[in-house]
Amino acid sequence: MENHESKITEYALITGASSGIGLEFARIAASKHINLILLARSAEKLMQLRTELEGLYPIKVLAVGCDLTDPGTVEKVASLLHGRGIVPDILINNAGFGMYGPFDRIGAETEANMIQLNVTSLTELTKIIYRQMHSRGRGKILNVSSIAGFMPGPWMAVYHAAKAYVLSFSEALATEARGSGITVTALCPGPTETNFENRASTGAGIKVFKRFGKLPAARQVAEYGWKSMMKGKTVAIHGSKNRWLAFLIRLLPRKTVANIAGKIQGL
């Protein structure tokens, strides 16, 4: 696959496509006449999105309502695509969630679901699609990490750790993929205007997200991520403040970084 947007690919697979950044990725891809496989828990929202996009553009949209926190879902999706003879040229792993609060008060099941979605399902889906891309000698993968992936995050310990995994995994795979025709991009946004904070926060947690002031729109982040993916950029940090933060974090002791993050996110 060539690294410019005039190249029309056959299919893009996008997880978490019913809202936020994933929804905007779907709209961007559709505007470029790329057929879509859209995954999200809300089948109803996906069907509405399919109607919208197929009405606007000459594309096919396969909407798959599924829950990637359930082990085995990735294999079911892979079987569905295999049965239809679909091999994605673009994979965007966007689905994910976080939870705010003291580690001892967050339910173990919630954290297990977070790891399953943010880490395990992402890795399994990437492996399946990467192998297909590798055999064809082309493809683009974008994994949505976060600025949180650069630092330990008290009060969101598991979420920060999961996003650190996504960042490290993406950088390593990007290196392995050199010369194969495949590029791997880790998109690292900061707080963004989506429904993430509503799911992640309760009580004092809402105040944490309000400390960041006006947040960038999901569309802005998706457009930046799309352009970075098309250029084959390995790590794409959205926003100049977030890029400076990622740079400064590398210069400070890890304990100091954790303490600062704890004060910003503290209850």
Image (cartoon, grey):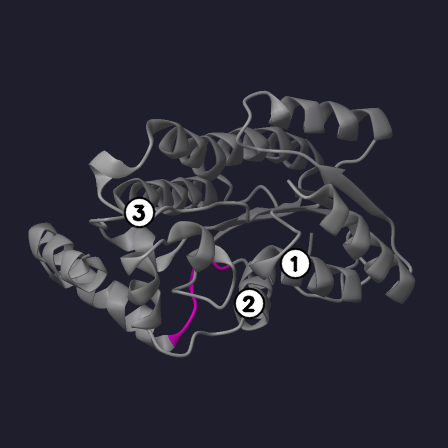
The residue wearing badge 1 is 23
| Towards the viewer: 75 or 67 | 67
Residue at 78% across, 43% down: 63
* Residue indicated by mark 2: 218
Q: Is residue 180 above or below residue 60?
A: above
Image coordinates for residue 197, horizontal then vertical, percent:
42, 58
In space, the residues marked 2 and 1 are separated at their CA atoms by 9 Å
Q: Of the residues under marks 1 and 3, which one precedes in the sequence?
A: 1
Q: CA distance from mark 3 to mark 2?
A: 20 Å
Query: 10 Å neighbourhood of mark 3: few (<14), some, or many (≥20)?
Result: many
Please name the residue shown 62% across and 27% down the image: 74
Q: Residue 23, how many percent across, how many down?
A: 65, 58
Mark 3 or 2, nearer chain start: 3
Q: Is residue 193 magenta?
A: no
Q: Amino acid at mark 1?
A: Leu
One can see residue 190 in this view = yes
Q: Is residue 11 left or right of residue 90?
A: right
Instruction: Please say if 39 is above or below 211.
Output: above
